[in-house]
């Protein structure tokens, strides 16, 4: 049975959800900039692997040079800031009803978030640096939440925008 929705419901949903992720990323970046030391310690401990099981087969992966650790942390903050800006621009495009451009820009921003939290925090931090072994410096649950949220927003952004009287109907 076809479902009908108001013409602007899906774009409004995409706008608000994209804006939510943009706001989240902006607040994360701002927090890391204004309270630099808190997550700096987190990154240092994860990269140093100093709270893992210290398995000799894995410890060769540890990065203990604080300059390299801090460079990685600054790179994370730059990436978070860039993602927030891209998503804010995508949100603005959604409000302008430029759906094709909004979808493309929002996709780039959401993929940036998913790469950071999926590849960066879950894969590299969680597996390569064995963050899962740490009781004190384990951010896998938080990373998964952000990854899933961004993925859901990405899916919503790619739902077909209503062209006629039926939501999701596409002419062949």
Image (spheres, rainbow, N blue to C red):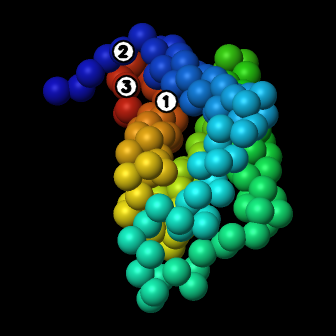
Residue 3 against residue 151 in the figure, above or below: above
Residue at left offset 35%, top offset 23%: 166
Which numbered marker is on residue 161? 1
Secondary structure beneath label 3: loop
Side of 85 where 124 appears, left or right: left
Give SS at disc 2. Answer: loop
Sooner in the amino-acid sequence: mark 3 or mark 1: 1
Q: Which mark is residue 167?
A: 3
- How far across and down, in percent of the image, does residue 127 sit? 45, 69
Lower sequence index among marks 2 and 1: 2
The residue depicted at 37 percent of the width and 33 percent of the height is 169
Locate residue 131, reporting x and y percent.
46, 61
Identity of the residue drawn at 65% across and 57% down: 44
Q: Secondary structure at mark 1?
A: loop
**Residue, far top:** 6
Mark 2, residue position: 5
Is 113 located above or below residue 88 in the figure? below
Q: Badge 1: how crowded within 10 Å, few (<14), some, or many (20+)?
A: many
Percent from the top left, x then y, of residue 106?
A: 64, 38
What is the x, y in percent for residue 141?
38, 45
Q: Residue at x 24, y 26 (%)?
A: 2
The front one of 131 and 5 is 131
Q: Are marks 2 and 3 in contact (CB under 8 Å)?
A: yes
Label 2 Cα neighbours within 10 Å, binned few <14 / some 14-19 / many ≥20: few
Q: Nearer the viewer, residue 108 or 137?
A: 137
């Amino acid at each position: 049975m076809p479902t009908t929705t108001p013409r602007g419901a899906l774009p409004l949903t995409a706008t608000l959800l994209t804006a939510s992720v943009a706001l989240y990323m902006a607040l994360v970046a701002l927090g890391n900039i204004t309270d630099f030391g808190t997550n700096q310690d987190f990154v240092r401990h994860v990269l140093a692997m100093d709270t893992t099981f210290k398995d000799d087969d894995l410890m060769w992966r540890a990065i203990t040079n604080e300059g390299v650790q801090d460079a990685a942390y600054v790179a994370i903050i730059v990436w978070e800031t860039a993602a927030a800006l891209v998503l804010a621009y995508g949100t603005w495009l959604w409000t302008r009803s430029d759906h094709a451009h909004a979808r493309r820009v929002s996709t780039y921003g959401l993929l940036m978030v998913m790469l950071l939290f999926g590849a960066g925090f879950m894969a590299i931090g969680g597996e390569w640096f064995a963050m899962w072994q740490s009781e004190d410096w384990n951010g896998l649950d938080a990373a998964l939440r952000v990854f899933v949220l961004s993925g859901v927003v990405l899916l919503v952004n790619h739902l077909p925008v209503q062209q006629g009287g039926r939501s999701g109907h596409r002419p062949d």
